[in-house]
Image (tube, rainbow, N blue to C red):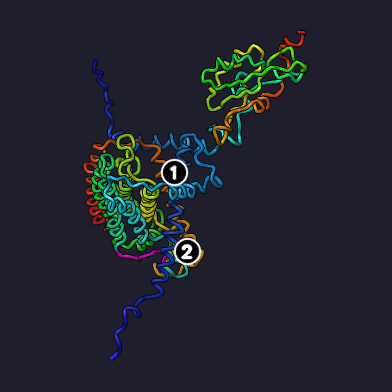
Amino acid sequence: MPMPLSPFDRMDWHLIIAAAIKIVVFVFFVTLPLVAMSVWAERRVSAAIQDRVGPNRVGPFGLLQAVADGIKFLLKEDFTPAHVRKFYFWLAPALTMVPALLTCAVLPFGSQLFGEKMVIADLDVGPLFVFAIASLTVYGIVLAGWASNSKYPFLGGVRSTSQMISYEICMGLSIVPLVMIYGDLNLGRIVHEQAQNGWALLPLWGEGLSLKGFILAIPMFVSFVIFTTSMFAETNRLPFDLPECETELVAGYHTEYSSMKFALFFLGEYAAMIIGSGLCVTLFLGGWSLPFGWLAPATIDSEVPWWQGLIHIGAFFAKVIGFILFFIVVRWTLPRFRYDQLMRLGWVFFFEIALANVVLTAILLWVLK
Amino acid sequence: MAIIVQRPKLKWWEQLYLPALVSGMRVTLGHLVATLTRKTKVTMQYPEEKWDANLPDHYRGAPALVTDEHGRERCVACQLCEFICPPRAITIKPEEIPSDDKWAKVEKRPRAFEIDMIRCIYCGLCEEVCPEQAIYLRKDYAITGTSRAEMVHDKERLYEIGGVRTGLVNKWNDLK
């Protein structure tokens, strides 16, 4: 009788080591520096928009400003007010940062490199995983608002909860048409499909270059608008930053926080923004693929030379950075919504439009079968 | 009186909010491009670029004492500036000029002359009140120090800032 394999033997060491390397490189050497850089970009771009200079002292073009800010946050007094609920007060900042980084796991940030798929976890439920984890972010904000035990954070937390719950529905519904068209929930395969047959928003090559492709681009565009707008609301960015609306709520849910705990909220917001951009790029703008099917691998499993793999990774991050710049420009363009307008937009318009869009896509797919 | 604000009736495409988004983006991106291509003049990069060459003649910087072309310190310690100084930044300790001095006829000079630059408000009243043309507001504006004591300009420092000023009325020269 053969010995049953111990769990230790069954472990796929190759998978574990490859995943570990991808986690370390993608999360710690790419995403976190990208967070720091987007803080810098936010300040420089907003300065340029307002005819100012922005931080340009630390390092070349002020690029090391983020490092200086980080050191400042670490060295500042970490003050915990006496009236807060300590455990939840300490838990909240981590709870905003962790889900934002967890969602990196399913994003395909490249095709292949040395035969290794450039995604940390190649799940077959990619978008669902992202929504499931991203909705945990709200707990961080709610806990921060509640544990701070004072009125402005509390109001910020309450606002954030209702805002996030409202827009989560629109966000989820907005990608249903996309999933219906591609018939797949694996983000890697969705991107591959787009590399072959045209991006969801730009069906200009492959099978996308047909009447069917152009007609289906209409519901895709509606989905894209709803998804992007909901993402602004989910990440608490202007014009939907009511949870931390300075003019009414001081700083909203992080009013009582200082030093690194405050920085974690700050970084969590930017990390969520980057992951949201990554998801949007993956779903609607072809992820790592180049336009017009250039250098697109023939099948999902076909060998990709290492230099093409690097180009794909570069394409993904170029798109993400472009999207982040779009986020930044929108922030410094639009005024903040009023709270009832925000709720009206979410429940009265986006919810209905997203539902109608699902039905429209279903009809179009049936007609164009 | 109540003012009734007429809300404009928006067309359906205006209610979509997207045209407003586009026109808003056009404004911000216009500014962005203008700043990046350096069409817009932005703030001066202060420590590297300075306005010094363009300071107007009437600029009121740090007050300082001057000597004239004869090397005489012009202050006669009359203390008018000390009395007029609104924030009381000036402290003068007068002394008699010894009789063997070349300028003994002036009789008085400051033994110590201190201006507390933390208190000074650069109003220029000291310059205005001085009967001897001895104190002037110069164009130095970056007065810094790491302690309160360092911010007090003593007589030596004041003459260093003030330097020699020519073309003044030398009323003491004619007197015996």
B147 versus A184 height, above or below: above
Q: Where residue A68 sits in the image (x, y, percent)?
A: 49, 48
Labels 2 and 1 touching (C-beta < 8 A): no
Q: Label 1 belongs to which residue?
A: A42
How would you rate the neighbour count of disc 2 (Cα within 10 Å): few for under 14, some for 14-19, many for 20 or more? many
Among numbered discs 2 and 1, the one appearing first in the sequence:
1
**At 61% across and 31% down in the image, what residue appears?**
B50
Seen as rendered, the residue at the extreme top is B175
Q: Where residue A38 sits in the image (x, y, percent)?
A: 44, 48
**At 41% across and 67% down in the image, what residue appears?**
A20
* Image disc number at residue A18: none
Which is more toward the observer, A362 or A116?
A: A116
Secondary element at tag 1: helix
Residue type indicated by callout 1: Glu
The label nearer to you, 2 versus 1, is 1
Determine the image quadrant of residue B152: top right
Which is more toward the observer, A141 or A39?
A: A141
Span of residues in magenta = A117-124
Dot 1: chain letter: A
* Image disc number at residue A309: 2
Q: Does the magenta run of residues contain A121?
A: yes
User: Can you say which quadrant of the picture contains the N terminus of chain A?
Assistant: bottom left
Q: Where residue B31 sits in the image (x, y, percent)?
A: 47, 35
